[in-house]
Image (cartoon, coloured by chain):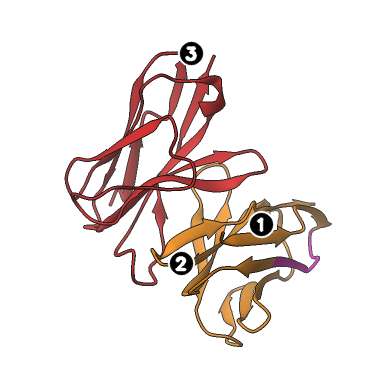
Chain colours: A red, B orange
Amino acid sequence: NAGVTQTPKFQVLKTGQSMTLQCAQDMNHNSMYWYRQDPGMGLRLIYYSASEGTTDKGEVPNGYNVSRLNKREFSLRLESAAPSQTSVYFCASSGHRATNEKLFFGSGTQLSVL
Amino acid sequence: EDKVVQSPLSLVVHEGDTVTLNCSYEVTNFRSLLWYKQEKKAPTFLFMLTSSGIEKKSGRLSSILDKKELFSILNITATQTGDSAIYLCAVRGGSNYKLTFGKGTLLTVNP
């Protein structure tokens, strides 16, 4: 019973490099999310996907792109990494955005951009 | 803009103490308030509250919501070192049912 699986767990990039964070859930959830967490800032929403085939911007989308590949998978791409994107990234999923359902989180990706 | 404010931002107590964590919010079209506990990795769900005045309880933890005054509290009685964590409050609302998180309260329980 894996829940939400994120890869990689750690990554170090140089400024300007690109990478994709992968996320998959096995709970048949409709909605998926990408958050970033910085010290003293709580969790801030980058992008979300209310259902397969749709994606929308959150609070801090600049510098990121997403793909909802299918119902299970939601990836986050950094096209040209910047030091300001050093953070811990969490993927999450929930049953349906419009209902009062809790989010289930992956274990996070610690990203450092040098 | 939706806003969730938690206080205090950090708190240090001794084992056995009782603590109260606060969460106030300004959210349009309020639907629910959620509490999460975050230790080293992913946040884990504690409570979801939708109705005013109804206490949710799980062991030594309890939470209550006041929709009139727009706040919630999370109480932890007889604290243990294992309660040391960041406690996050999140509120779902808005036209797109967005979940907005507060900055969290870092609780440290010393033996």
* In this view, the mark in front (3 or 1): 3
Give the total number of marks visible in the rendering. 3
- Locate residue B90 relative to residue A96 in the image: left or right: right
Q: Are marks 1 and 2 on the same chain?
A: yes
Residue drawn 56% across and 59% down?
Answer: B1
Image location (x, y in percent) of residue A102? 41, 64
Image location (x, y in percent) of residue B90? 54, 62
Indicate the secondary structure of the residue bearing disc 1.
helix
Question: Can you identify the residue that label 1 sits on?
Answer: B83
How far apart marks 3 and 2 lie (CA) works out to 36 Å
- Foreground of the two, A14 or B76: A14
Question: Can you identify the residue that label 3 sits on?
Answer: A15
Indicate whether A54 appears above or below B35.
above
- Classify mark 3: residues with Cα within 10 Å, few (<14), some (14-19) or many (20+): some
Residue drawn 66% across and 57% down?
Answer: B83
Question: Can you identify the residue that label 2 sits on?
Answer: B94
**Chain under numbered label 1:** B
Give the numbered dot on residue A8: none
How far apart marks 1 and 2 lie (CA) works out to 32 Å
Q: On the image, which quarter does residue B11 sit in?
A: bottom right
How far apart marks 3 and 1 lie (CA) works out to 38 Å
Indicate the secondary structure of the residue bearing disc 3.
loop
Image location (x, y in percent) of residue A41? 63, 44
Tag 1 and tag 2, C-beta contact below 8 Å: no
- Foreground of the two, A25 or B92: B92
What's drawn in magenta, residue-wise?
A: B15-22
Q: Amino acid at mark 1?
A: Asp
**Chain under numbered label 3:** A
Q: Amino acid at mark 3?
A: Thr
Indicate whether B51 appears above or below B74.
below
